[in-house]
Image: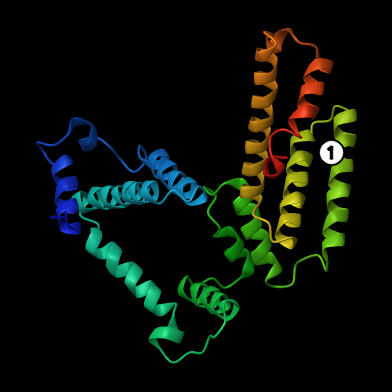
Amino acid sequence: MNHYSFEDFLEIVARLRGEDGCPWDKVQTHESLREALLEEAYEAVEAIEKKDTPNLCEELGDILLQVVFHADIEKDAGNFDMTHVIDGICQKMIYRHPHIFGTAQASTPEEVLEQWERLKKEEKKQKTQTEILKSVPEALPALMRAKKVQKKAADVGFDFPKTEDAMEKVFEECKELWDEIKCNGSGVEEEFGDLLFSLVNISRFLKINPEFALTNAIKKFINRFEYVEKSALSEEKSLSDMTLEELDLLWDKSKYHTGPTQQ
């Protein structure tokens, strides 16, 4: 069975964006494709989480389409093409792995990461730690960005000594938020943000991915809600017609009927 090659793929994208190509593909820009790039990346992550290998293969292809599409836009603009993209990442991998392609020593994952960050800092000519903090992309999901910023601050010792101290900060921020809510103050959003930031810090101490933790909490909520709704429908009741007490009773029951991994 013959398979298409990477060169075939480049030609297909070029044809789609060519003068006689697809009306939709021809008018796309970096900006119009931003959402699609993020969506494809998240769909690949979901396939990984579900251990859905066939779907992962498809989603990786969708991500590759985004990469090639953006590169083809720049090729038409005369700036760079896929050759430059591939050359750039090859150079980066070789430069940041001197323990493989050079004479440096790094025998543990921790040593490799430390070396990677040092070389990255030198490569980007970042002189201060503040510059490094600012380099964390603002387009990242806020929880992920918060954790990365906190980690980079902790790299130079700007951190709580232990988890208990970080938890005290959570309690402090929770009280400040509640105080602001009670007086109907203008700083509710700011205090809420501070509380979220402090909770992310706890996730870092506990080595928990806050994005995954929140995703699992959402899944748990949906599973329990599904149990509540199905229970109501089995009694020919509508959720909107039930009292809060009835809903609470079903919700409590859902904790014991949706499985131990969903509680």
Residue 257 spot, x, y in % from top left: 72, 33
Three-letter amino acid code at disc 1?
Answer: Leu
Q: Residue furthest bottom?
A: 103
Q: Which residue is mark 1?
A: 177
User: Where's residue 223, x and y in %?
Assistant: 64, 32
Query: In the picture, which quadrant includes the N terminus?
Result: bottom left
Query: What count of labels does the image hold?
Result: 1
Quadrant of the frame with the C terminus? top right
Q: Position of residue 69 (x, y in %)?
A: 27, 47
Residue at 88% x, 48% y: name it. 171
Please rate how many residues cluster around mark 1, counting C-alpha atoms within 10 Å: few if below 14, some from 14 to 19, many from 20.
many
Image location of residue 138, percent across then percent down: 55, 50
From the viewer's perspective, is 63 left or right of 255?
A: left
Compared to residue 125, the image places residue 220 above or below, namely above
Left/right of residue 184 with respect to residue 30 in the rendered view? right
Nearest the camera: 241 or 8?
241
Q: How is the image coloured?
A: rainbow
Q: Is residue 23 above or below residue 108?
A: above
* Residue 164 in the figure: left or right of residue 146: right
What residue sits 66% from the left and 14% below the top? 234
* Residue in view at x 85 percent, y 43 percent: 174
Q: Secondary structure at mark 1?
A: helix
Q: Is 65 in front, or is 78?
A: 65
Identify the residue at image location x=74%, y=72%. 157
Image quadrant of residue 148? bottom right
Instruction: Choose between 78 and 4: the one closer to the eye.
Output: 4
Residue 196 is left or right of residue 116, and the answer is right
Single out the residue that lies furthest toward the left. 20
